[in-house]
Amino acid sequence: MLRVLGSRALQLILVVLGISTLLFFLVRVSGDPALAVAGSEATTEDIEIIRESLGLNRSIFEQYFAFLIKLATLNFGDSYIYLQPSMPLILEALPSTLYLSFVAFALAMLVAIPAGIFAAVKRRNASGRFILSMSMLGQSIPPFIIGIFMILVFSVWLQWLPSFGNEQPTSIIMPAIALSAVLMARHTRLVRAYFIEEMNRGYVRTGKSLGFNNRRIRFKHILRNISVPMLSLIGIDLGKFVGGAVIIEAVFAWPGIGSLMVNAVKARDYPMLEAGVFTVAVMVVLVNLIVDLLYQFVDPRLRAKVN
Amino acid sequence: MSQRMSAFSFFVGAKSDALPKGPGRKKWFRQAGPISLAFLGAAALLSFGANLWVPQDPTYQDLLYRLVPPFEIGEGVSYLLGTDQLGRDVFSRLVHGGKVSFAVGLATATLAMLIGGFLGLIAAYFRGWQEAVILRVVDIQTAFPFLIVAIAIVSIVGAGVNTIIFTLVIWLWTPFARLAHAKSLSVKESEFYRAAISSGRSGFGLVFQHIVPNITGAMMVVWTFVVAQTIIAESSMSYLGLGVPLSTPTWGSMLSEGRNYLETAWWIATFPAVAIMLTVLCVNVFGDWLSDRLDPQTKEI
Amino acid sequence: MATKAGFAKKSVSAVITFVMAFAVLTAFNTSASANTAVAGAKCTNLKEQEYVNNTVLICKATKKGKRVWKKYFKGGSGKTVTIGIGSLPPSLEAYAASAPPRSFIVGAIYSALTRVDLSTGTPIVKPNVADSWSQEGNSKTWVFNLIQGKTFPNGEPVNATAVKASLEWVLNPANRAGLRAKISEITRIEVMSEYKVKITTSAPRYLLPRALGTVPILPPKEFAAKGAAAFWRAPVGTGPFVATSFTPNVELVLEPNPSSLRVVPAATKIVFKVIPEDASRMSGLRSGGLDVVNKVPTDDIASLRRSFAVNSIIEPATYHMSIMAKSGPLADKRVRQALNFAVDKQALIDRVNSGLGSIAQAQLVPSNLTGYCREVTAYPYDMKKANDLMKQAGVSNLKLTFQTSTAYITNDVLMAQAIAQMIERLDAVDKVEVEVLEFSKFLDVYYLRGAIPRKDLFAWRMSSSPDLDAGVQMARYTTNYSTHNIGHSDPRYDELIAKASSLSTRSPARTRAFCEAGKILKENAPILWGIHTPDIWAGKKATKRFFIDAGGNIDLVSIGN
């Protein structure tokens, strides 16, 4: 257990350092944040003053060193454009993104697992093949297309659901569906494939010949076995989800971390970007850690190995 | 993290029935792969040959004929799928727009496969620090939201087809590296590989004669799914305004321009949306079909 | 005889026109420089409004035709109004800028010495922190008499000390206040008594009361104690509203301010929702979640008009393209003129902007602004002339690059593409490539600072709100203007602009100087003139008194009554 935690901590440091360094240089090459801070009415002198006060006239290595210190102390400084400490702003937006991600994720799993099992059991029937085809279709539509057409139908035409923001309890419905569609489709297929594979395994046949009923085999043994590979996939997907909702956030004007970071890149708001990158990286690593722990809980063989 | 699952299933999750095929599979279903491929081939040919047969210039604007609905015959002019907000022919733009989608899809997937495959092979061949570094980079990248990096890259390099391909390759080489690495390792443990080593072979000759041919099938399967991913990613980037310059029509940019007109002129966004869906669907169906044939046991790595 | 009669008629009408023009000009400027401007006085225009004792008065015609103030509503009687907006400033900073959307916030939560009322289309300077003002002797000195007996929400008095402290903070270059440029001529601020301030400028500045309408007065002790950055996070002001919640990029909630100096707004709550995507904002309106939205795409207007109220104004700015003319074919005046002849501005309005907006004469401001010159007219659309000019200049196979912003100016990308196509139709032009710039890139290029150089054509516009005057814009085309160096240089032009800025907006000499400068600018054509873009808002029909002023500001005080 400690070893896992230790290696995860190391991974966290590596991920954060790697990504932050990459972005640090990428964004600094991209242009001068002083202009974005100054706006369109400033004079050349104003811009010079701003550059000085932001420490932008120092050499890039000095800036990188300062950045490493900020990273170590977790104090990323005030956002250039919001004039507020950047970390709290990110943390304020984070729950929204997490909420959307988790609801979408839960939705995807709640649909995908039963649908996948059903499609596996009924794989020779029309209903099973229908689910398979639908999942193929679901994987082929970019999420933002689902989003914009849902807004048209359910907000504008039918006026059932709010089209933007996160105010009412119903606000989550459309963004969550749009975000989860691809995952839902993918995991339906995965569950189905794993399930079919397990059904062809020896222990299932043995179980059957020993007179266990089908349901017990399916839902106790097979499910337990496929949950191992599924979990690892879920870990990766959930990680991607945390920061990957950028487009959906844009389409639904969802007040999350994605739009905050996109704006930060566009406006070259370094403190904001650095705080955001740090937070996302931590989230991703944490999620993976949880999955790792679950993974060992589900698969006793691994538990034995580690201990 | 990297070894505990197949890169293939991690990436596409599209593993279909294990062989052998049951009697329940209808004939048409088994033909879905070739049919999709034929459709894709035809679509790609028509797109790349658009200059030869599409009568309208896709960038030609006629402000007199803005937002003409589809299937409407004007005086002397007819627009099959209507016109957009600048009076450009949606049909011509759709056909020409396919060029970028196909070109980006094919180029990205191929480049990513070469780079990722090469790095995966290196990792598996040398083990040691090369493996550690490469797999660590793969992990880091998998953990990070691609679009944020994409925006940063585009804002430095500027928008364009090459930028898109570059950005997407940076993102999409990882599944190939994972797969090549995992597959090569399993090949290295096989009998015939040991036999080859004991017969005195070594170095790149060994890799190219014995490892590469054995991982090609799986790589091809992933390649098709990456093509599908790329088409979706390209349209997403164009949608966020990170795509190719305006003078080049693409499905993604048509969609993002047309989004403002969904209420007033549904056809601008709807046709490219359908085109993206159909194309990606066909690629996925074909990939699925291919995986049944080339690489039925990928998952057992 | 006939000619004599004609002459008499002409001269009479000329005299009448002159008198009327003079009367109008005087009327517009009386409040700017008048000796007194007391609330409750006769109004000069029907849409004008006045804030007195928590009541909004609007100007109404009586049966006799006299214009007098009518009580419009008492504060706090309305509902919640939700406004979907394309962007909001990232902070509640008071001294950053004065144009929309910054002005929505500043005008709502702070009070300045004066208030510039743009509801009538021409700026009328109204009392705010100052009750009245007058100019003294040498015309470089102004005396402001302040409102008496009011306090900031934290208990600090609204008095001369507060005025002095606020203005001096803005004037200090170390504080890098964006508004410093607006009042940089101020050399001295003296507290004459508790409610009397004397302000001295380095040169006569006739627009000073107007300019001061953009600079809020803040409670000096709290501001100094907290420091600016902390103050902006929890600002204290005497505007009609208090910001009760502000999440950058997401929303701003405004509620009536008990310490409001002059009026309590009609609505009980105003919520600004930031929704950058046009389509999302429009579906927010259509689906009922939003009461009002701004930046309505022109193509949505026709369908919106059926069930919504659409309000549009002509922005106090000219959408135009600066021509990079330092070298190459564009250094030839004839080529630049040819480009101007090749652009069909009416088509831009009719076909790209759904008939909204107006043709820009060859000037940088629309006709309702001071500094506009009637004599300088637009280049007509004339392809033959354009082709001839190109031929004379001996230009062929021209390849141009057109840089445009995106989602910054109404229909910017659409117009760029349409104009590029129009120019491509010239015989001498091969190709016009449109380069779309993200906002931060756009600013790089605008300031000539980033990695991307300024290309042949650079489209932009700058709002003159709330000055509604041509001066600042015209200055950008003087020789080697620091942030706008595109190769235009004309000593005579520089001279005229310098002269004009030292003169009163009332003075005919100023208008003449701008006219002459305008003619030079048209002849030199460092600019490809476009149109005056529309600024379009839409709202539910049930939203009462949904009104946009000439500066593009929504009237937050009376909406939702």
Image: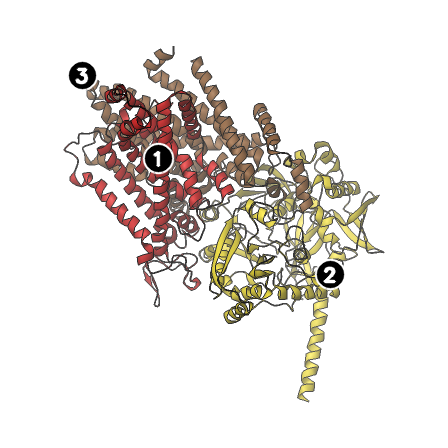
The chain letter corresponding to red is B
**Left or right: C226 in relation to A180:** right
Determine the chain carrying the residue at label 2. Answer: C
Q: Which residue type does callout 2 highlight? A: Glu
Q: Residue at x 22, y 29 (%)?
A: B18
The chain letter corresponding to brown is A
- Looking at the image, can residue C561 be seen? no
Determine the chain carrying the residue at label 1. Answer: B
Q: Residue at x 32, y 38 (%)?
A: A138
Q: In terms of secondary structure, where does tag 2 sit?
A: helix
Are callouts 2 and 3 both on one chain? no
- The colour of chain C is yellow
Are callouts 1 and 3 both on one chain? no
Q: Which residue is mark 3?
A: A206
Q: Residue lying furthest front in this view?
A: B200
Q: In the rendered image, which quarter contains the N terminus of chain C?
A: bottom right
Q: Which residue is mark 2?
A: C495
